[in-house]
Structure formats: structure tokens, C-alpha cells
Image (tube, rainbow, N blue to C red):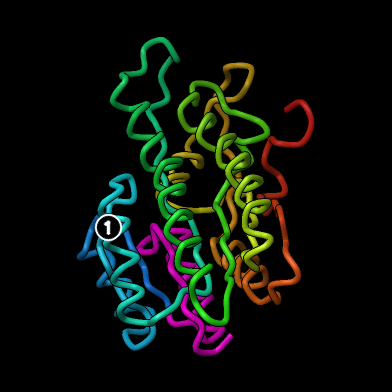
Amino acid sequence: MADKIALVTGGGTGVGKAITRALVGEGFQVVITGRRAGVLEDAAKEIDAGSVHAVACDVSDREAVASLFRTVGEKFGRLDLLVNNAGVSSPSVPLEDLPVEEWNKAIGANLSGSFFCIQEAFRMMKAQKPRGGRIINNGSVSATTPRPNSAPYTATKHAITGLTKSASLDGRRFDIAVGQIDIGNAASEMTAKMSGGVMQADGSMKPEPTIDTAHIARAVAYMASLPLDANVFTMTVMANQMPFVGRG
């Protein structure tokens, strides 16, 4: 995988940062993007300033995404791997009380941003020589089993599964492999509250276990290591003790 080019959205913190570290370890040059330039630059310096390249971008902004991909094309001339990792959660409030601004924020970051990046990646991967590439979407176990008061996040993750399927089908004839990793309780800023208790399906509050983001990163690195005639279409990596399988 040496000298291959990857783009990781939401790459400055949490899962995205861990994925970036793992890809660099496999020889990738990695462009990381997110809304906060300072955070991205700090992450690049911490991991490997020679192999990690920070480019600020709000993926919910269509024109900003187009500019991001132009930058990647101008600097590297190709893109071998896109990891659609950027995303946000929403306030845990009753569905009927959720402000429309929070709904739109989740749709923009979690769904539209992934779609915009896939569009641009398709254009680049179809045109480059050798043709093709790989796209890995960050889904969630919420796409299968939602939490209480999580309609925006859950809806976007269900949609990511559909987007993965459609993009996988549409990319086949262009040697573009599209897959998805569904994550359950990776330790990050988004899951920090779980140690203090999170609402369960019966309305009770209970702490939940988390797992190190390095486990997610290793899984993504494996998916990225495959030749383009092979694909991990879906993979679930989760805390083994979390209340996901079964009725509690």
C-alpha cells in the first residue's frame, strides 16, 4: 500500500485520527479533513507531518468538498481510498422537541457530506490511471438498532447503509469497491458520556463499555489492504459487552 493516497474525513480526532495513524503505518499518504484547521494540523504533526496533510473542509458544504478534491488532485494526482468518517450526534431529546436546525445539521454532516465526497471520489477514481479505488463509509450499529431519542443520527446511519449499497453497485464496473464499517461504542468524544450512563430502551440509565479506537483503525486498514477485486462489504466492530445483541 506504499505511496497510495487516502482521504479521511473527520480525521483530526477520535476514530478518524486512529484510522489515519493506521493507514500511515501501512504506507499511505493521508489527507485529513474537518472543520477545525488547528485540530487537523496538530493531528498531522502528532502522527507524521511528512505523511499526513491537513486540509480544512466542512463536508456538508458542496462547494467546499469540490475544492477539497481539487486540492487532492492537484497535490497527488489520484485518490486510492476515501474514508467517509465525519459525523455528528444530536441532542438526546424527545423526537417532537428536536429543533429543525439539529435535524439539518445531522443530515448535512452525516449523510450529505458522505454523498458529496462519494460523488467527487467517483469522478476522480473513474478518470485516473490505473482506474478505480476504494471507499469505506463509517456506519453505525444504530443503522440496525437505534437508541432512544436518536432519530436524526439513526436516520442518517440507515441512509448511509443504502448509500453504501447503491455506490457499491454503481462503482463495480469502474473498479471502485465500496464498503461500510459499523461501529459500536468506540471510545471517543462522542461516546465519552457512556461511562456515566446512557439511556436504554426501557428508559433506564446505565453505563456502557467502550473499545479502543485502534481496533476500528486496524479493521479499516485491513479493508483498505485488499485488491480491488475483493471487498469487505460490511463489517461490525463493537464492544462485546454492549447492549446490542438481544433484548437488553
Q: Is residue 216 above or below residue 147?
A: below
Q: Quadrant of residue 208?
A: top right
Amino acid on which disc 1 is placed: Cys
Q: Nearer the viewer, residue 43 or 156?
A: 156
Rendered view: 69 above or below 209: below
Task: State left or right for residue 209 relative to residue 85.
Answer: right
Q: Residue at x 44, y 42 (%)?
A: 110
Depicted 139 relative to depicted 16: above or below: above
As drawn, 146 above or below 18:
above
Outermost residue on the left side: it is 38
| Element type at mark 1 | loop
Identify the residue shown where x is 37% and y is 26%: 103
Please state the total of marks drawn on the protein image.
1
Per the rendered image, the range of residues in magenta is 1-29
User: Residue 177's x, y, as percent?
Assistant: 65, 63
Decide which of 221, 243 is in the foreground and name it: 221
Mark 1 lies on residue = 57
- Position of the C terminus, as image quadrant, is top right
Q: Position of residue 127 (x, y in %)?
A: 49, 71
Q: Position of residue 239 (x, y in %)?
A: 66, 50
Q: Residue at x 51, y 83 (%)?
A: 4
Queried whether the magenta region covers residue 28, the answer comes back as yes
Task: Name the quarter where the N terminus is drawn.
Answer: bottom right
Q: Position of residue 132 (x, y in %)?
A: 59, 71
Residue 223, picture quadrant: bottom right
Dot 1 surroundings within 10 Å: few (below 14), some, or many (20 or more)? Answer: many
